[in-house]
Image: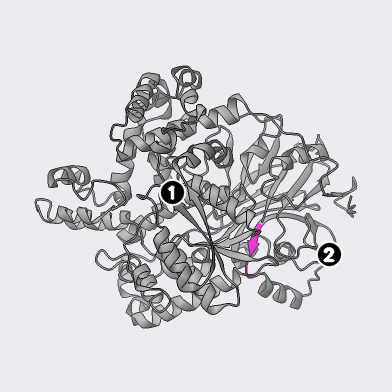
Amino acid sequence: MCGIAGMFNRTGTKAVTEADLRQMLALLRHRGPDEFGVLLDREVGLGNARLSIIDLGGGSQPIANEDESLWIVFNGEIFNYIELRADLEARGHRFRTSSDTEVILHLFEEYGTGCLNKMNGQYAIAIWDTRRRRLFLARDRVGVRPLFYTQTSDGALLFASEIKSILGDPRVTAEIDPATVQQIFTFWSPLTPRTVFRGIVELPPGHFLMADRGSVKVESYWRNQFPAATAAAQDGAAARQPEEVIEQFRALLIDACRIRLRADVPVGAYLSGGLDSSTIASVVRRFTANKLVTFSIAFSDEKFDESTFQREMAEHLGTTHHVVQATHADIGRVFPDVIWHTEVPVMRTAPAPMFLLSKLVRETGFKVVLTGEGADEFLAGYDIFKEAKVRRFWARQPTSKWRSLLFKRLYPDIGGLAQSNLALLSAFFGEGLGEVESPWYSHAVRWRNNRRTLRFFDDAVSAAAGADMLAPIAAGLPDDFKRWGSLAQAQYLEITVFLSQYLLSSQGDRMGMAHSIEGRFPFLDVRMMEFCNALPPRLKMRCLREKWLLKKAAQPWLPDAIRRRPKRPYRAPIHRSFFNDQTPDYVRELLSPGALKASGLFKPGAVEHLVRKVASGSPIGETDDMALVGILSTQLVDHLFVKNYRRPEPLSAKDRVKVCCLNSNAAANPVAIAV
């Protein structure tokens, strides 16, 4: 795991300097504190901040191929690199290191962009072709690892693992894009490729970028694919016996865990007390020689605490278990640091305890953890999938008074929903009930409810954002989307809008790498994703029983209390984290009328009313909770990156930096010099 950065002055008139890259890398120190590397080749510079996990002594970056015509910097892991290396050696490639980074480079040399289809991993890659004077960037299939870029007015292409590194270049300044902020308040995340800053975009998951002096092109190499609804019912996979599918799933999951233990440092695991992380920990304990160490979050607020189940699972497995306590005050205290690392407003406080957890992991001496993200999306674990199924069932008999009662079985984490009267439930879930042909039918209720938070925006901001917020989603849907089944459509939206853009980013990569911790996700193994996508819906959700296949597969491995417990989404307290007997000064400062007027995004009067309501101890609903954290985090983004952004000192002589300088005729015969 690392952070990468670089620039390509595409006009060719300006050379990249070592100082340029030292500045960018200084802003990625938290991602890779072990050592740094720089490649300089006239108009191009590549940089790497390394967190050494594989080939600790020999894997320093940048790395070149045999004739030094190709150079790479890389963030992530290629879990099948051992098998890929053997194939490449049989084809005549020779290696200088034992790292997965060098495998990628030779794979690119052999297959070009087709190398991406052979890699099973999580990655952001930059390769410079000295002969063709061409830059290649690529990102993994679902966006586990981030990669951002921008183009400046003088023709430069700048890229980095984090936006703050791009802002380290004086040609780039941060300006908040109000339309993207409204996307975040509606969908919980920006819609790819946008970021909250104008002119800075992400390379979308499953895409690569190719840039030379004449053009910059972005292309897709992978996307989630589901069978057509008719095929899902008739295909041979659907006709197979469930026992056969369960065994295939188990074998895939065991191997996905096994190859994610490949490291030259110890590997631990997160343990939430739920089905997904418990299954991963059980596989590691049962089928590998890893002496498992597990890590959990315990909340002082019992509404969110799952420590009883965590302890039960840790005792069942006999792991060495570590717990971080998260209080309301803790969450409020670290929240500015959280937003510094997310670089985007959030609608939840859930990243904050993950920030505290990764700090504990680092203090315990670990760099790598396995975790259970992806199971809910690819095996239909969330209540939103049940909600869509119930709404479609109700829509077939919309006058039924009984079908709408099924909503009482959903969302146990949302206080009071199960106690709501039938009229309220029918009104809330019934709007748009008959629009079953809508491509976002499954998410319509969530997104409509989220839009209630937009009332806090300044009128001018709302007008500038435009009315059709769903247009970018519609434009990005695959051509065959309408032929998929309803569950597949819902899964696709959840994976592309929520998993990739929020869960793996603000709550995943950014919180882990804030303390130099790499997360690995067995359920996001490409073989697992494609296997699950091809399954018929009945093997994922039966009636309203979520993750049917996973529960069956994990039955021999887990205590019944863990396997049978209802799905409980990971959440963290919001308003009580900011308004309590230790309310941080920044909360009232950034939510003051003066600060709100200065940012120009929100209505000071509306926000002041919300703040008074929260401070008075009045009951706060889900929407107001989301609005509060969304407004506060947006104000923090404005404060940290727009109004008060300060570039740190660049890497100094005290830092360990490998510098590779190619001579001025690099295209003909480059020479690497290590300093």
The answer to which image quadrant residue 539 occupies is bottom left
Neighbor class of circle 1 (other Cα within 10 Å; few <14, some 14-19, many 20+) is: some
Residue 204, visible in the rendered structure: no
* Residue 61 image position (x, y, % from top left): 77, 55
Residue picked out by circle 2:
66
Neighbor class of circle 2 (other Cα within 10 Å; few <14, some 14-19, many 20+) is: few
* 275 or 496: nearer the viewer: 275
**Disc 1 residue type (three-letter):** Val
> Along the polypeptide, which appears first: circle 2 or circle 1?
2
* 146 in relation to 279, above or below: above
Residue 499 sits inside the magenta stretch: no
Quarter placement of the N terminus: bottom right
Tell me the tag on residue 323: none
Q: Which residues are magenta?
A: 76-80
Q: Residue furthest front?
A: 581
**Disc 2 residue type (three-letter):** Glu
The answer to which image quadrant residue 114 occupies is bottom right
Q: CA distance from mark 2 to mark 1?
A: 41 Å
